[in-house]
Image (cartoon, helix red, strand yellow):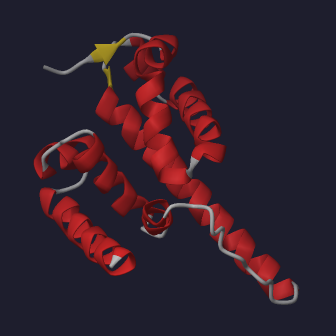
Amino acid sequence: MVDSLGSVSDVWEKWGTDLLSYATVLVGPDEAEDVVAESLVRLMAVESHLVDGGLLTLGYVRRVVLNEVRMRYRSRTRRERRELALSAPLDHHELLSDPAVVTAVGRLSVMQRAVVYLTYWHDLTAESAAQELGVSTGTVKRHLARARQTLRKALS
């Protein structure tokens, strides 16, 4: 059964907690609220026919959040490259207080984090995760295998 809602405020009331936890896994707690808020603003501005028609699903909204994370990541990466080219090399220190798992998951790509989140936190099958993300099952399996391999190396 497809769970759908009729307005963006309904989205926040029903799925806000889930969307925040999803965004937290993807970008961390500092940016999660901003990502979800910006995603809902995009829904209001661009997808009004889906909202007004009651066709908005959790899977679709998760894809909007994932796309927002991707846009922020690309923007941040481009900005960091420009700043790095214009400045002296920075001395980056890793936070030693972070647990090893959080650090390892943080090093995964955005898509790998999304797949890990959906398959482990929400117990979705590869097929269900693929449907949620709007990609093929093979893509989900490939990203999950790469994430597992990376995490295995980082945590061993």
Identify the image quadrant of residue 53: top left
Which residue is situated farthest in the front direction here? 97
Q: Image check: 134 left or right of 36?
A: left
> Residue 12, image x and y in percent?
49, 18
User: How many numbered discs, if any?
Assistant: 0
Q: Quadrant of the C terminus?
A: bottom left
Residue 70: percent from left, percent from top:
51, 57
Residue at point 38%, 22% (across, down): 50
68 sits to left or right of 96 = left
Q: Is residue 64 left or right of residue 83?
A: left
Q: Residue at x 51, y 44 (%)?
A: 24
Along the line of sight, the residue nearer the viewer: 47 or 151: 151
Residue occupying the point 11% across, 48% down:
127
From the top left corner, tell me how far across and down residue 104 is, in percent.
44, 68
Between residues 56 and 53, which one lies in front from this camera angle? 56
Residue 4 lies, with reference to residue 138, above or below; the image says above
- Image quadrant assignment for residue 37: top right
Res 153 → quadrant: bottom left
The residue lying at 26 percent from left, 67 percent from top is 143
56 versus 76 height, above or below:
above
- Along the viewing direction, whichever of 152 and 85 lies nearer the viewer: 152
Nearer to the camera, 51 or 27:
27
Q: Is residue 137 left or right of residue 82?
A: left
Q: Position of residue 48 (x, y in %)?
A: 48, 21
Say if residue 134 shows up in the picture: no
- Can the viewer see residue 61? yes
Vertical comparison of 3 with 138: above or below:
above
Which residue ends up furthest to the right in the rendered image? Answer: 87
**Which quadrant would the N terminus be assigned to in this image?**
top left
